[in-house]
Amino acid sequence: MIYGQIIENDSLQVKDLSKSDFIKVINESHFAFFNQENDGNENFYGGAGTYSLNGDDYVETLTFTAVNEIRNHEFPFKIKIKGDTLIQFGIEEIKDVGIRREIIEKYIKIKK
């Protein structure tokens, strides 16, 4: 990840990527993401599951997570690919737990 922002209520939060690494792995049917602070082992989190892609409509089903309230939830996004950059954006919403936030994430493809 080279950029991440969350808009929730009237607040804008831009992820400080100078203090952590965030990677996302996508293959033909599954995705996984991992976030680790550069110093120490606190605040590690990750998740994984399946996805579907139809044009620019990208839907993640989060199957593996430590947060029970979002397990097996579908997250619909739009994606754009510009060169080696994937831009993922949309609304993360889980009404049962009161989560509703707009996200924009940008990822650079790792060269082999």
Image: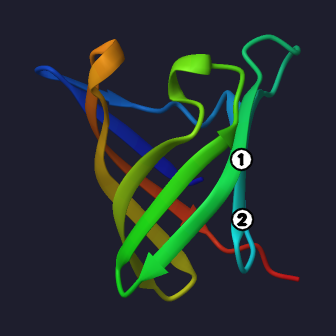
Contact, mark 1 vs mark 2 (Cβ under 8 Å): yes
Using the image as rendered, state which of residue 99 and residue 24 is in the foreground.
99
Residue placed at 88% from the left, 14% from the top?
A: 40
- Quarter in which the C terminus is drawn: bottom right
Q: Secondary structure at mark 2?
A: strand
Residue most extreme to the left: 10
- Give residue 48's mark: 1
In the rendered image, residue 64, in percent from the top left (x then y), is placed at 73, 38
Residue 107 image-quadrant placement: bottom right
Using the image as rendered, state which of residue 88 and residue 57 is in the foreground.
57
Say if residue 53 shows up in the picture: yes
Residue placed at 84% from the left, 19% from the top?
A: 39
Q: Is residue 30 left or right of residue 41?
A: left
In the rendered image, residue 21, in percent from the top left (x then y), is placed at 73, 40
- Give residue 103's mark: none
Q: Secondary structure at mark 1?
A: strand
User: Eyeballing the image, is 21 above or below 85?
Assistant: above
Name the residue tied to disc 2: 30
Residue placed at 33% from the left, 57% from the top?
A: 89
Say if residue 24 shows up in the picture: no
Q: Is residue 74 left or right of residue 6?
A: right
Q: Amino acid at mark 1?
A: Ala
Distance from label 1 to label 2 (Cα)? Answer: 7 Å
Local packing at callout 1 (Cα closer than 10 Å; few below 14, some 14-19, many 20+) is: many
Residue placed at 71% from the left, 21% from the top?
A: 66
